[in-house]
Amino acid sequence: MEVKKSPKADLEGKKTTWMLVGYVIVLAFMFVAFEWTKRDIVIDTSQALSDLVFEEEIVPITEQKQEVAPPPPEVPAAAEILNIVDDKADVKESVVASTEDTGQKVEVKYVPVKVVEEEPEEQTIFEVVEQMPDFPGGMGALMQFLSKNIKYPTIAQENGTQGRVIVQFVVNRDGSIVDPRVVKSVDPYLDKEALRVIGTMPKWKPGMQRGKPVRVKYTVPVMFRLQ
């Protein structure tokens, strides 16, 4: 028996039509995919910014309380003692008389005020100045003067005492020698002779400071040597 086919059930005739429809759909999807770009994407950030809130934590400042010292206790006021005098008691009244009533003169004594004067610059003793004092003729002449005028003490010669006595003195503004003293002693007799010779020296050329003569402290060694 031969099977009869219905013309509606025949799909071979519509195969080509459905294939064309499929191609059209695929091309449509590809066209949409190529035309879709990132420029069409819009991101709305207004809500995100409005929801973002920065909260700042406030740290309280701690202050140390300064302890205030209590006030000193009040000194109680001295109670006034009232002496009640009897009405019948004899009380002598003191009368203060002015100079106009007595006619006596008031003596005003003047008490001088002691003023401590500072030492003037002229009396200042310098140790180092711009131009030191100088013996007339220089140091060579000073050594000759000392060796010529020194008289060796007899007791020191008998005891064989010798050495160098260092004497310090002050050269005044006029060149005179004052306040000689021994700063290094050897023997009392040699010290005494060294002071005597220093006291007989002639006037020196005074020291100068800023173009003016000043008092200067000077040191000279006096040599005692036995032959």
Image (tube, rainbow, N blue to C red):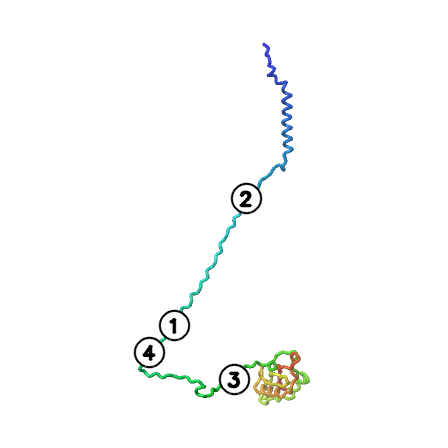
Mark closer to the chain start, 1 or 4: 1
Q: What element carries label 1?
A: loop
Three-letter amino acid code at disc 1?
Ala
Question: Most extreme residue toward the front, as rendered?
Answer: 101
Mark closer to the chain start, 1 or 2: 2
Three-letter amino acid code at disc 2?
Ser
Q: How many labels does the image show?
A: 4
Name the quarter where the C terminus is drawn: bottom right
**Mark 3 or 4, which is nearer the eye?**
4
Going 57% across and 42% down the picture, which residue do you hit?
Answer: 46
Mark 3 burial class by Cα count in 10 Å: few <14, some 14-19, many 20+? few
Mark closer to the chain start, 2 or 4: 2
Q: Is residue 185 shown above or below 27?
A: below
> Does the CB distance between marks 3 and 4 fall below 8 Å?
no
Q: Distance between the residues labelled 1 and 4?
A: 21 Å
Q: What element carries label 4?
A: loop
Pick the front one: 213 or 196: 213
Q: In which quarter of the image is residue 117?
A: bottom right
Q: Name the residue under label 1.
A: 77
Three-letter amino acid code at disc 4?
Ile
Q: Distance between the residues labelled 3 and 1?
A: 41 Å
Q: Distance between the residues labelled 2 and 4?
A: 94 Å
Q: Which x, y percent locates residue 99?
A: 45, 86
Mark 4 burial class by Cα count in 10 Å: few <14, some 14-19, many 20+? few
Mark closer to the chain start, 3 or 1: 1
Mark closer to the chain start, 3 or 4: 4
Mark 1 burial class by Cα count in 10 Å: few <14, some 14-19, many 20+? few
Point out which mark residue 112 bears.
3
Q: Name the residue under label 4.
A: 84
